[in-house]
């Protein structure tokens, strides 16, 4: 007998046994249905130039709106890409200020002020796809075709992208300056070596090293985010880690030595609101890092101040804001578990407080859990 018919007969016998009047029917358990697969052909990611979407589109929207807008960006047909130019243009000032100079970004029009200064570069970036020169056999330069077409760096490269291209460093450099010097994200290489010849090309991840041994001082526990944001943010990974370890372990008498380094980093935040030069305590008559000397001196004294005579504790950095006459108040300052310290830090780094303290946001409106200023242990577990 054919094996298929034998299987049918066997299944029929089993079904007959299970349905007999002398047996108890088993309980039927309905498995949860899997969600339907996306329709083939629907775009969910342009797979264009790395970091353009993350860095320049809906950068400072709250998470839900940002997600919706970025989905729309990725799903848009090419004929509608120009609809996103304005959003990209409005965020370019951030990168223009990263080298402590405003106006030296590639393709910037110095005859214009505000977002219009970046019209040309915004239009180029709106065409968010990677171009390849198939006539070339040399593929060592990411964005080679784009740099050649705009006469920014004439070359005969094939362009495109390979696993060995440091795409983020190239993108940062093209966004920050006139290509006169490299701007890096501080990651000099992957944890593993990639290949252009050996499959699967992208190598596997290597675990992080063991944590440091418990012992001496490893963190000042000062103002939130100052070390991360302003100490060696653009150095290589090794140099950045070494500098931050030194910063954290340095005694108070030597803190002033970090003022110049902090000043060099402040321009990045000065441009976050699309305007360069309106940061608090900025010295308009100066250029470069000297413009931020006053503010960098304040931040180099990286410790929290508390007005113990005050009973109201609702404003992070209240004492510092009062002493510098930026925001007179009668608050105790310090820091409690319910302060949104990152939003306040962003605000005082970005503008002249014209938008109010804690109006420049990191997009995280609340913690996952509610902490307390009265009930031990104050900081709630996640």
Image (tube, rainbow, N blue to C red):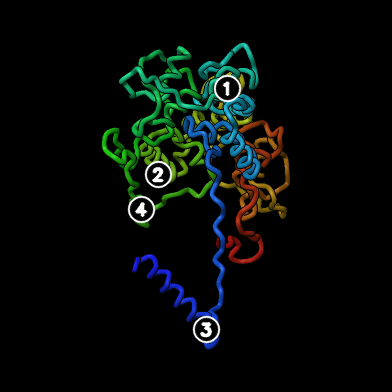
Determine if residue 334 is in view: yes
19 left or right, relative to 326: left
Say which mark, if any, is on residue 212.
Answer: 4
* 4 or 1: mark nearer the eye: 1
- Residue 36 image point, x, y percent: 56, 52
Count of all numbered marks drawn on residues in the image: 4
Label 3: which residue? 20
Above-or-below relation of 267 to 178: below
> Within 10 angstroms of label 2, few (less than 14), some, or many (20 or more) residues?
some
- Residue 64 image point, x, y percent: 64, 45
> What residue is at 61 percent from the left and 54 percent from the top?
367
* 2 or 4: mark nearer the eye: 4
Which quadrant would residue 55 be assigned to in this image?
A: top right
Label 2: which residue? 245
Q: Earlier in the sequence, mark 3 or mark 4?
A: 3
Task: Calculate the distance from the C-alpha at mark 3 to the C-alpha at mark 1.
Answer: 74 Å
């Amino acid at each position: 007998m054919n094996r298929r018919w034998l299987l049918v007969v066997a299944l029929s016998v089993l079904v007959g046994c299970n349905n007999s009047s002398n047996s108890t029917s088993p309980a039927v358990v309905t498995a949860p249905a899997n969600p339907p697969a996306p329709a083939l052909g629907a775009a969910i990611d342009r797979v264009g130039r790395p970091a353009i979407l993350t860095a320049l589109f809906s950068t400072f929207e709250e998470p839900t709106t940002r997600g919706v807008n970025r989905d729309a960006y990725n799903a848009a047909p090419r004929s509608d890409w120009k609809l996103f130019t304005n959003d990209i243009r409005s965020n370019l000032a951030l990168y223009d200020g990263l080298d402590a100079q405003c106006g030296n970004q590639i393709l910037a029009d110095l005859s214009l002020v505000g977002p219009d200064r970046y019209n040309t570069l915004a239009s180029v970036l709106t065409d968010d796809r990677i171009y390849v020169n198939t006539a070339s056999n040399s593929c060592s330069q990411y964005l080679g075709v784009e740099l050649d077409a705009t006469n920014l760096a004439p070359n005969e490269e094939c362009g495109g992208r390979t696993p060995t291209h440091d795409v983020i460093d190239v993108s940062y450099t093209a966004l920050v300056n006139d290509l006169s010097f490299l701007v890096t994200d501080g990651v000099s290489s992957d944890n593993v070596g990639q290949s252009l010849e050996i499959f699967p090309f992208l190598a596997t991840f290597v675990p992080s090293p063991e944590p440091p041994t418990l012992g001496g001082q490893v963190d000042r526990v000062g103002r939130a985010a100052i070390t991360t944001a302003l100490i060696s943010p653009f150095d290589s990974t090794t140099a950045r880690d070494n500098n931050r370890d030194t910063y954290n372990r340095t005694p108070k008498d030597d803190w002033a030595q970090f003022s110049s380094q902090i000043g060099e980093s402040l321009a990045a935040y000065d441009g976050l609101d699309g305007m360069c030069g309106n940061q608090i305590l900025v010295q308009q008559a100066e250029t470069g890092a000297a413009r931020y000397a006053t503010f960098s001196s304040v931040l180099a004294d990286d410790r929290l101040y508390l007005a113990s005579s005050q009973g109201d504790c609702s404003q992070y950095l209240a004492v510092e804001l009062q002493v510098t006459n930026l925001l007179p108040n009668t608050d105790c300052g310090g820091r409690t578990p319910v302060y949104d310290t990152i939003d306040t830090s962003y605000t005082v780094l970005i503008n002249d407080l014209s938008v109010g303290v804690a109006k420049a946001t990191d997009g995280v409106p609340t913690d996952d859990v509610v902490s307390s200023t009265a009930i031990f242990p104050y900081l709630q577990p996640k």
